[in-house]
Image: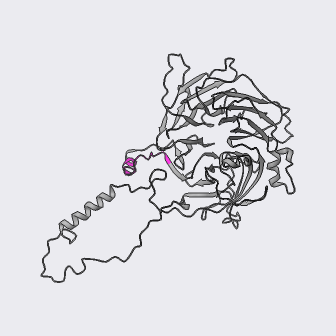
């Protein structure tokens, strides 16, 4: 990824981050002239006899035109983002009528990974302009690697599209509706590219004390850095607040890994903090945070994968269980209480690398996976049996889709709707899917001209170099995706 253009400012200075893209268009429309009837003088005399078909034209001419029209109808009339190739000089822009909200925001360097930080502004909110907080890590160019940093960011002024009503109040003042969004950031130097970052809010035993917001960063250096970004977040909304240099230092550094990695996840069921990290050697470590704030990494690794661990997630319902996805094509399920440190379940789910996965928080026996061949699938974990049992064998996904032709780079279930899944892929798209859709016979006829487009596909959003996406847990339907820029959007379909 190359350096992107951005309006740079000093640390903590708001960056004005563009407006909305223009309306979706393909810039190859020819100029249209006046229609001329080439047959207007055909009947100059009532005595003139012409051999013609039912429309007054010779049969041969009419049949030739109909044949040409059929050739056009049978051609690739539907433009499919990520599949149909643009002609030289053509460009794409989004159709604003299909979005409730759409903004692009730029950072000084590209970000491979980010996470959304829960805030105190309320749940299920729909007031515009919207505000959200995120944390990400940069990927600076080779000679500038020392400039890499964590970016604690505040996105504000995220207005709705023209004509979109405010669901929360008819009296909402929309005078700022068309203003550009604002990106404010606090930079934490780390000197290494961030491969993956995850945020967590640790809840103290003393309920009167505020939560502490932590980040875990997997870096190219093989070290895992844990930062307390609580003061950085507070500085956005407390005038005069300053982040001291010592607050930029990690509160803990995990040095157990011998190789860099991409897999990291905090458990949502452990209030103090429980962290999994996995590396390119296939090794997984567990780090636990005490109530006093210290971190201890268990020196006994979880071993079983024969290649790199690409993704890990804790079970949303069982505090001791987690799953891991690997470039060895397997997904394995583990129990941290196991003395053997071996997986309880191991399933071959792809012939290629399994890059990403997502555990449904609404229906916790469902797991979605995305692979290097562009296929993503949904699995029912109740059908998986331990190796060596009579029922063990290759599992069958309850749904699978080969729509994308490039690697799947991110996948995530909707936080409150277990039928909606968002997928990012290397074909520069973010797609939204509704697994509840079933195609009946009548609908099959209507979609017969659109080849290889499943009826479950709800929406396609163009995102150049799409890397990672997340649903906002407190703004229903809002998605954030990182790539060449950060894209913040909500469609009318979700």
Query: Nearest the camera: 35 or 467?
Result: 467
For the view shown, which residue lies furthest in the bottom direction? 45
Marks counted in the figure total: 0
> What residue range appears in magenta?
442-457
Q: Is residue 69 visible?
A: yes
Say left or right for 89 vs 73.
Answer: right
Q: Is residue 452 located in the magenta-colored stretch of the structure?
A: yes
Say left or right for 353 vs 79.
Answer: right
Q: Estimate the x, y position of residue 482 in percent, counting from the top left.
A: 63, 49
Q: Estimate the x, y position of residue 144 in percent, counting from the top left.
A: 70, 49
Q: Is residue 69 above or below residue 142?
A: below
Q: Is residue 84 above or below residue 255?
A: below
Query: Nearest the camera: 146 or 276?
Result: 146
Q: Is residue 457 above or below residue 261?
A: below
Query: Nearest the camera: 13 or 143?
Result: 143
Q: Estimate the x, y position of residue 136 in percent, counting from the top left.
A: 70, 46
Residue drawn at 18 percent across, 66 percent down? 59
Q: Estimate the x, y position of residue 181 in percent, counting from the top left.
A: 69, 60
Q: Is residue 316 located in the magenta-colored stretch of the structure?
A: no
Say left or right for 150 vs 46.
Answer: right
Residue drawn at 57 percent across, 52 percent down? 464
Give the colouring mode of the picture.
one colour
Query: Nearest the camera: 115 or 450?
Result: 115
What's the magenta bit mostly, secondary-structure-wise? loop
Residue drawn at 75 percent across, 29 percent down? 287
């Amino acid at each position: 990824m190359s350096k992107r253009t951005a309006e740079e400012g000093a640390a903590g200075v708001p960056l004005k981050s563009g407006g909305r893209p223009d309306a979706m268009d393909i810039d190859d429309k020819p100029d249209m002239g006046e229609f001329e009837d080439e047959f207007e003088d055909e009947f100059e005399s009532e005595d003139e006899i012409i051999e013609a078909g039912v429309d007054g034209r010779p049969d041969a001419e009419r049949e030739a035109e109909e044949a040409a029209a059929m050739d056009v109808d049978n051609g690739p009339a539907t433009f499919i983002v990520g599949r149909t190739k643009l002609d030289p000089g053509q460009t794409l822009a989004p159709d604003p009528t299909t979005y409730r909200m759409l903004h692009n925001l730029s950072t000084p360097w590209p970000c491979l990974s980010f996470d959304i930080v829960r805030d105190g502004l309320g749940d299920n909110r729909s007031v515009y302009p919207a505000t959200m907080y995120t944390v990400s890590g940069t990927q600076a160019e080779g000679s500038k690697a020392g400039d890499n940093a964590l970016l604690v960011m505040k996105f504000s002024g995220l207005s709705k599209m023209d004509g979109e009503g405010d669901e929360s109040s008819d009296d909402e003042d929309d005078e700022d509706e068309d203003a550009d969004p604002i990106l404010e950031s606090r930079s934490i130097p780390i000197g290494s590219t961030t491969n993956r970052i995850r945020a967590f809010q640790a809840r103290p035993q003393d309920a009167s004390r505020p939560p502490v917001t932590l980040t875990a960063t997997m870096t190219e250096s093989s070290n895992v850095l844990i930062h307390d970004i609580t003061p950085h977040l507070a500085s956005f909304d407390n005038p005069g607040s300053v982040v001291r240099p010592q607050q930029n230092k990690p509160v803990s550094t995990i040095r157990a890994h011998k190789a860099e990695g991409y897999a990291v996840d905090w458990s949502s069921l452990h209030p103090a903090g429980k962290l999994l990290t996995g590396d390119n050697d296939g090794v997984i470590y567990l780090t636990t945070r005490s109530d006093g704030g210290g971190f201890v990494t268990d020196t006994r690794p979880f071993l079983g994968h024969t290649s790199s661990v690409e993704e890990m997630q804790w079970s949303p319902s069982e505090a001791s269980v987690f799953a891991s996805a690997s470039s060895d094509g397997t997904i394995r399920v583990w129990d941290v209480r196991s003395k053997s440190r071996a997986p309880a379940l191991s399933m071959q789910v792809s012939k290629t690398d399994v890059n990403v996965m997502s555990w449904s928080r609404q229906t916790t026996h469902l797991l979605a996976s995305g692979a290097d061949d562009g296929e993503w699938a949904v699995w029912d974990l109740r059908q998986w049996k331990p190796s060596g049992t009579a029922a063990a064998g290759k599992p069958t996904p309850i749904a699978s889709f080969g729509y994308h032709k490039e690697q799947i780079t991110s996948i995530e279930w909707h936080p409150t709707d277990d039928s909606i899944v968002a997928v990012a892929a290397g074909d520069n798209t973010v797609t939204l899917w509704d697994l509840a859709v079933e195609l009946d016979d009548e609908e099959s006829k209507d979609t017969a001209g659109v080849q290889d487009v499943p009826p479950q596909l709800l929406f396609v959003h163009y995102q150049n170099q799409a890397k990672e996406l997340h649903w906002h847990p407190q703004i229903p339907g809002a998605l954030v995706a990182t790539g060449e820029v950060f894209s913040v959007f909500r469609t009318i379909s979700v």
